[in-house]
Amino acid sequence: MSLMRAEIDEAPAAVARVIAAMPAIAAVAARIRALDPPFVTLAARGSSSHAGTFLRVLIGRDLGLTAAASMPSLASVYHRPQRLGGTLFITISQSGRSPDLIACATQARASGALTLALVNDATSPLASACELVLDIQAGPERSVAATKTVVATLATCIALVRLWAGREPELADLPARLAAAPDWPRLVPTLVTTAHIFTVGRGPALGIAKELALKLAETCGIAGLAFSAAELAHGPMALAGIGFPVLAVLQQDAALPHSEALLASIAARETEVFAAGGMVAGGIVLPVLAPSDPDADLLVMLVSAYRAIEAAARARGLDPDRPRALQKITRTF
């Protein structure tokens, strides 16, 4: 068994630790609620930036706040402080050691922002640079391709936003659902043979689509292009066709009918369309658990997808634990 697969299988236990740490998350949420920031800025790289996309949508949808992605190079390369006084600045990082993220968190705190780090190492330099810290508690991750840390981060994001909004997170059944995530054997042969693929999501699912595109690139050598279902309807749709499949992760919310209709129109063009979480005419429906919590269900689909990607990498003769030209900790400046 690869390290990647072993760590995918550790995701339920990692999320159980997130749930056990709910009092700490509630304390951070209370501190943010007391500040009542007018907007939120997030900084992250790689898989953590996809968790940031997920979090930005949750903040906008559930709290009515604008949450924007920062440009860390403004701090680390251009040394241009941003006017962030009275706002919330969130950094997300597995290692907490990327110099550009540390620089932008340091500048944000100096400007008067309330700074929060979501990290898998509460002793890291990034954690020390921020006023508030949430340890995602995923445990050591040895595979270069991050999986359980991403799932634990996403679960932390759901809990944080719901507690911030004054709601109960209601995630108690998520570890069991992650453990029961179904495999996607019909997807694997396509991932073994294709050179490129669209990954599609909308709303919170866009962050999942971006994460899948990255994992397909780094472990399988597949050029994954991630788009919102709304953006796919524009120029990128011209690429979809025979030999350019689509993998869609769909959420049970108001965006579902539009996404299903768009994907059906793509499937009608003899494109392989794999859809998880919805019904697409002419598409291949991937198995999912019965709907429970629309946001948390995306994490279950992510685990199913991770398993398929890991299996496809091995079938392509690649080592998913050691992607070419990559290392576990990436330090960007």
Image: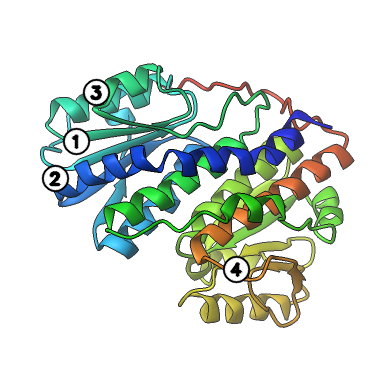
The amino acid beneath tag 4 is Met
Q: Nearer the viewer, residue 189 or 60?
A: 60
Q: Position of residue 241 (x, y in %)?
A: 73, 68
Q: CA distance from mark 3 to mark 2?
A: 19 Å
Q: Are marks 1 and 2 in contact (CB under 8 Å)?
A: yes
Q: Position of residue 193 (x, y in %)?
A: 85, 51
Disc 4 crowd, CA 10 A, few/some/many (<14, 14-19, 20+) = some
Q: CA distance from mark 2 to mark 4?
A: 43 Å
Of circles 1 and 2, the one toward us is 2
Residue 88 visible in the current orientation: yes
The amino acid beneath tag 3 is Thr
Q: Which residue is mark 4?
A: 237
Q: Earlier in the sequence, mark 4 or mark 1?
A: 1
The amino acid beneath tag 2 is Leu
Is residue 120 left or right of 261 when viewed as pictured?
left
Q: Earlier in the sequence, mark 3 or mark 1?
A: 3
Q: Earlier in the sequence, mark 1 or mark 2?
A: 2
The amino acid beneath tag 1 is Leu
Q: Which residue is mark 1?
A: 114
Q: Is residue 309 above or below residue 264?
A: above
Of circles 3 and 2, the one toward us is 2
Q: Residue at x 13, y 30 (%)?
A: 111
Number of labels in the image equals 4
Q: Which residue is mark 2?
A: 35
Q: Which residue is mark 3?
A: 106
Of circles 3 and 1, the one toward us is 1
Is residue 102 left or right of 186 when viewed as pictured?
left
Is residue 279 left or right of 308 when viewed as pictured?
left
For the C terminus, the image quarter is top left
